[in-house]
Amino acid sequence: MTTTPTAPAGAAPVVETRALRMSYGSADVLKGVDLDIRRGEIFALLGPNGAGKTTTVEILEGFRQRSAGEVRVLGTDPARADDAWRGRIGLVLQSWRDHRRWQVAELLTHFAMYYPDPRDPAELLDLVGLTKQADKRVDQLSGGQRRRVDVALGIVGRPELLFLDEPTTGFDPEARRDFHDLVERLAREEGVTILLTTHDLAEAERLADRIAMLVDGRIRACGTPAELARRAAAQAEVRWTASDGSPRREHTEDPSRLVWELHREAAGPIADLEVRRPTLEDTYLHMVHRQNWDDEQETGFPTGDTTGQATAA
Ligand SMILES: Nc1ncnc2c1ncn2[C@@H]1O[C@H](COP(=O)(O)OP(=O)(O)OP(=O)(O)O)[C@@H](O)[C@H]1O
């Protein structure tokens, strides 16, 4: 089992789980999940279909009772949380479905009344890019615009912690980019902690400060996108065309040295030179396709420890 790094001394993690387990009947979905999410970070949870991402998020939100383990969200066990706690977290649900006949501005104004210090509805419309749709009925909006309404409802109460479960599914590229900008603004400018689940590796790479990979019931890797990419396969692939015209390919931990040697040998430019670094996708696929997790040592895999020390249990 691997763990994420502990938050710096003095700063209690916003989300903390230890040995979190969840079974549905005889199916063990979560087999001991350890997470530490720090205040103000964007944290992405990745994993294949059925890995248990939504289950984890629902437990953290207080919507699902866990089978075992410790969970603290904003210092409270979500299974015993009260309304004051709920006011501090933001959920992006498909709320528009229940309010399809409402006008957008009216709906936001209505929801704002539930919170002690809500965002101004006009400002919120601007923030999610719905100012022009303010007077439209929710059921007259496009799918992407409805999702923005859901996001607006998720942040109207100025949450300290925002859960985003596959938020950009169905977004066009521009809506996706706007949404990414909004998520970054919330985290960087307002200090909101964001837990994102996504199947979009590019999205995780672009947004997340740290990424955790949930595979076979446990967090198998955790770290910054760059750390995870690097540690998947330490070797870069170098391709070029030799002086006799034949294509060449070599894997190396030191591509700059190889390129320098090739350059010296060729005494000139190297034809068709390409250096391909390992990517986050390489790590992800490596983790997902690895078999027999419980039977093998996990040394050599990313642990989320930025010092590089393995913390396999
Ligand atoms: N209420 C439930 N009762 C029984 N089994 C469930 C229930 N909810 C989820 N599961 C099962 O638990 C496993 C994890 O589901 P979950 O939705 O948490 O995965 P996920 O990682 O979010 O998947 P996806 O990427 O497909 O959304 C799946 O095998 C699913 O069938």
Image: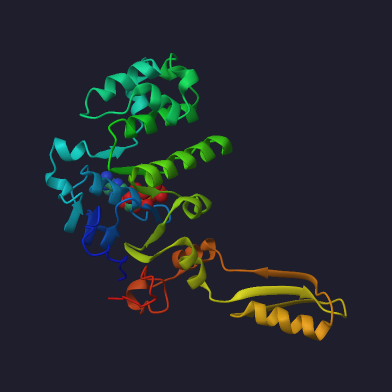
The residue sitting at 39% across, 26% down in the picture is 123
| Residue 312 % position (x, y) | 31, 76
Q: Quadrant of the C terminus?
A: bottom left
In the rendered view, does 243 fall on the left or right side of 167? right
The residue sitting at 32% across, 62% down in the picture is 217
The residue sitting at 21% across, 36% down in the picture is 87
* Location of residue 216 by image quarter: bottom left
Colouring scheme applied when the structure was drawn: rainbow
Viewer-side residue, 96 vs 117:
117
In the rendered view, does 256 fall on the left or right side of 87? right
| Residue 228 % position (x, y) | 46, 66
| Above or below 290: residue 214 | above
Viewer-side residue, 311 vs 261:
261
Q: Quadrant of the N terminus?
A: bottom left
| Residue 284 % position (x, y) | 48, 63
| Above or below 252: residue 109 | above
